[in-house]
Each structure stands twice: as structure tokens, then as C-alpha cells.
Amino acid sequence: MNNREVIIQGEGILNLIPQRPPIVMVDSFFGIEENHSYSGLTVTADNIFCETGKLQEAGIIEHIAQSAAARIGFLYTRQGEKVPLGFIGSVDKLKIYDLAKIGMKLFTEITVVQEVFDITLISAQVKVEDKLIAECRMKIFIKKE
């Protein structure tokens, strides 16, 4: 996605994800193209996953999970449906190349690899500017009511 124009940010993100402060790890949503969605996070000093001025590994994983949740939330709200809860089933092929420092902006691409019933397999790439800092695959279970 070349156009990094935010379509939802701030409080609007809370309509897409079930998490609430202080665990909100997505602050911008850039939209969906086919089987790709794009989200972001500006790393702040008050982030509960920050230590020694850097977003730690657990924070990156949570950011990926919430980026996937924002995708689902966007699709459901667009159809006028209630946003479902999702749960991480597994994290595979996780590679963290660098930790983002306070003030840096994460830009994350979620790619849907496969959807079967209530299970979605995604691939994620997290970048700061154009530098890849993390990637993984994640299996997410959607709890529909």
C-alpha cells in the first residue's frame, strides 16, 4: 500500500478492537486492499510494553494481534455487525529483528493466508519507516456470538 493515509485513528480504533487502555496497541488504521490490511502504532513512553525506551517483544506480538483484530473489526463494523472477540491460537515463524524506540511509528501489514470456519491464518510484517523489524504467522480464532 503506497498511500499511508489514516482512515481511522484515536478513539475510533476502540470501535474496531475489544482491547481498552492501557492495552491498546493500535492507534491508526489505513484500510484494506484485497487480503491485506494496514495499521500503525506510535510508540509512546507510557506504553506498558516499553522498557528502557523500547517497545519490547511482547508489545510487538500484541500489536500484530490487535492489527489483525482491527481488520476483522473494520469488516464487521462496515457490515453493521458487532465486532467479535478473537484469540491467538498460535504464533509461528516469529522473527524480531529490532525493537522500536519511543517516538517511532510502526506500520504493519496483515495478510490473510487462509480462512477456514472461525480460524484465520495471517502473516504479518511490522516496519519502522521501510525497515522490517518483525514478522510472523499467527493463527486467530474468532468467537462469533
Image (tube, rainbow, N blue to C red):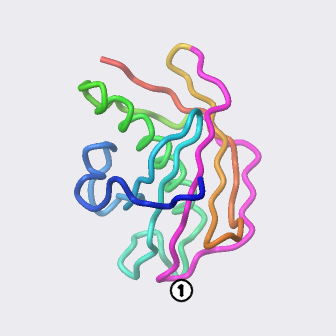
What's the residue at 59%, 21% (across, down)? 115
What's the residue at 24%, 26% (across, down)? 80
What's the residue at 50%, 54% (across, down)? 62
Give the overall secondary structure of the magenta segment: strand
What's the residue at 66%, 54% (across, down)? 125
- Residue 19 is situated, as x and y percent measured from the top left of the image, at 32, 49
- Residue 139 is situated, as x and y percent measured from the top left of the image, at 61, 33
Q: Is 100 included in the stretch rendered in magenta?
A: yes
- Residue 107 is situated, as x and y percent measured from the top left of the image, at 55, 62
User: Magenta part of the protein: which range?
Assistant: 90-116
Relative horizontal placement of residue 15, taking residue 51 as reference (left or right): left
What residue would you read off at disc 1?
Answer: 52
Nearer-the-camera pick, 82 or 31 = 31
Relative horizontal placement of residue 82, taking residue 108 as reference (left or right): left
Secondary structure of the residue carrying tag 1 is loop
Q: Quadrant of residue 17?
A: top left
Q: Residue lying farthest front? A: 3
Amino acid found under the numbered disc labelled 1: Thr
- Residue 79 is situated, as x and y percent measured from the top left of the image, at 30, 25
Nearer-the-camera pick, 85 or 75 = 75
Give the total number of marks visible in the rendering: 1
Nearer-the-camera pick, 70 or 53 = 70
Q: Is 12 included in the stretch rendered in magenta?
A: no
Dot 1 alpha-carbon crowd within 10 angstroms: few under 14, some 14 to 19, many 20 or more: few
Relative horizontal placement of residue 13, taking residue 123 as reference (left or right): left
Quarter of the rendering occupied by the C terminus: top left
Q: Residue lying farthest top? A: 117
Q: Quadrant of residue 106?
A: bottom right
